[in-house]
Image: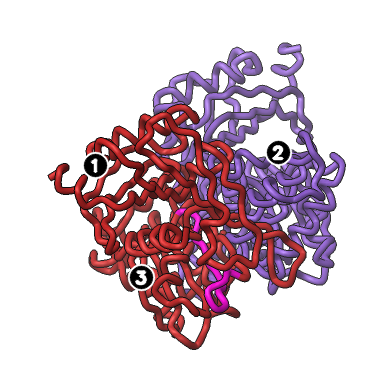
Chain colours: A purple, B red
Amino acid sequence: MSDEVCKRLTWVAVDWGSSNLRAWAMNAQGWVLARAGSDKGMLALAPEDYEPALLEAIGDWLPASGRVPVWVCGMAGARQGWCEAAYLPLPTPLNGLARGAVEPAVRDPRLNVRLLPGLCQHANEAGRGFDVMRGEETQLAGLVAREPSFTGLVCLPGTHAKWAWLEAGTVVRFATALTGELYALLASQSVLKHSVDDAELAEPGCREAFVAAVREAATEPGRFSQWLFALRAADLLDDSLPRGPARHAQLGARLSGLVVGLELAGMCHDLPDAPLTLIGSEALCARYGLALEALGHDSRRLDGETAVLAGLGLAQAGS
Amino acid sequence: MSDEVCKRLTWVAVDWGSSNLRAWAMNAQGWVLARAGSDKGMLALAPEDYEPALLEAIGDWLPASGRVPVWVCGMAGARQGWCEAAYLPLPTPLNGLARGAVEPAVRDPRLNVRLLPGLCQHANEAGRGFDVMRGEETQLAGLVAREPSFTGLVCLPGTHAKWAWLEAGTVVRFATALTGELYALLASQSVLKHSVDDAELAEPGCREAFVAAVREAATEPGRFSQWLFALRAADLLDDSLPRGPARHAQLGARLSGLVVGLELAGMCHDLPDAPLTLIGSEALCARYGLALEALGHDSRRLDGETAVLAGLGLAQAGS
């Protein structure tokens, strides 16, 4: 297997985040020959640890001689990472990310590593606040690799959900909502931890609870912090909720709907008539798609892994 | 000193919360003869631990013989507390809290303990959600002790900020905002912990940062979760912020303004033309007063300790 990979390997794609790394062996046609990964993310590594961590993941793929391009996006390029690839300012053509890449020094002569930059946005320009992204720009580049003149709004749900406005393949503005982190803090660290469980929307009553909460928070975002405490009070008082695990699952679905609805409330003036493009995992994008549908908006999904590979491929091809 | 207290003691007031207890020796005129306290709150106690914890705090005040009324509000009356004093439903006349008090069994013949009830609100009535309070109702009773026919809106800022609508001394509706807990979670457990410090508004630039954030969140609450991440990005990018500790203090003041502004956004339709009554500590009420002023509303303050003593006194006098 590794021999087969070695023979056909053209380059390596790496998404190196805060808490893990994922790597793909790629052939000349942009097909995935093999995958690897580890939990050695940026938070666990000093700069000198990156090359050994990379070799541990992809060493088996490398030929005995010759130099293999390794394109990396994500937190490995942060100031606290392997080597800083400084943020590119807006507007940023997404087919030009490679121009901001940096090449960390390596010992192994087979490695030719390039770290892609993130994007930054300065405030005091129309409708913009200070913002940064690192990793998501490569997924956006993946969208542009497929649709070079893409114009529209894109949402990448997650711990820190990113919304990007693109014009003809160039990022002109973006915003981040703390949605995923807010949900996690409230569900596991607040007084609500006694009342909510993480819920799949397929569980009984959860889809309805999620949709109702999205609508309420998107319509009256100012009542968000009241609705949070009301989840606890409902757990104590609401006889219409089921008993047992389904009770806390429904309240968890409602909490999820409240934080997603709050996020969408902030975007409501920007939501396009055309379908919004979501990039990410199937489950999370399905949840956002349902929330958008509840507010009368269509969406379409680009798979997150497909996007990151296409984005790294665009950088690799253009360099 | 204790001898003097013993001679003049008429009753004992106790505010027994989740994490501490505070007790006051009271004379017949409602004056405070002595104070005591401990960190033995509800979360640290099993039912059988309450009497020893109470005697440890107030035992020195008790006469050798005779039975002393001890009026207790707060979490000691919760289901997980000493003995449950069931929530009273709305509407609740605040001069009648004593009717819902329960008397836990005690061994010491000098103790005559009464635990005051909390209030609960059921949903599906006009403008109301499920809600509970336990402890704050006694502070509201303290307001009514001073102004028996009080009609208006009252805010008790805190971890779980309470807003109560009173009509002629009766609670007809209330709401809870998770404001203090939301601030604490974001400031100490989220990605923002690297960028914000708790700030006094007297520190340079903090008052202005707080007021600006209150206005923004109260005006556009839907952008709340975007503004949260923007605090982190501003820490990375904003050259107009001072360097050093003042930077994180200003960002902390801004975070405080965002959560208070979000809370006020939910109340904006209810804010009266007459001054809003705030009940609580001087520092926290000053912060809320400033936030209300920024939105064009007057406020007045009733001290939290004064209120709880007056509320327990009202129960004691009426029993």
Residue A261 image position (x, y, % from top left):
70, 60
Residue kind at label 1, given as amino acid type: Trp
Q: Judge whether residue B161 is colored magenta.
A: yes
* Cβ–Cβ under 8 Å for marks 2 and 1: no
N-term mark: 3 or 1: 1
**Same chain letter for marks 2 and 3:** no
Task: Note whether residue B222 is visible.
Answer: no
Quadrant, the C terminus of chain A: top right
Residue B236 image position (x, y, % from top left):
39, 54
Residue under numbered circle 2: A198
Q: Is residue B219 above or below residue A134?
A: below
Quadrant, the N terminus of chain A: top right
What label sits on residue B302 in the rendered view?
3
Q: Is residue B299 above or below residue B196?
A: below
Q: Residue at x 33, y 49 (%)?
A: B12
The answer to whether A275 appears left or right of B16 in the picture is right
Q: Quadrant of residue B206?
A: bottom left
Number of the front mark, 3 or 1: 1
**Same chain letter for marks 3 and 1:** yes
Residue under numbered circle 1: B61
Residue kind at label 2, given as amino acid type: Asp
Q: Residues within 10 Å of mark 2 (few under 14, many from 20)?
A: some
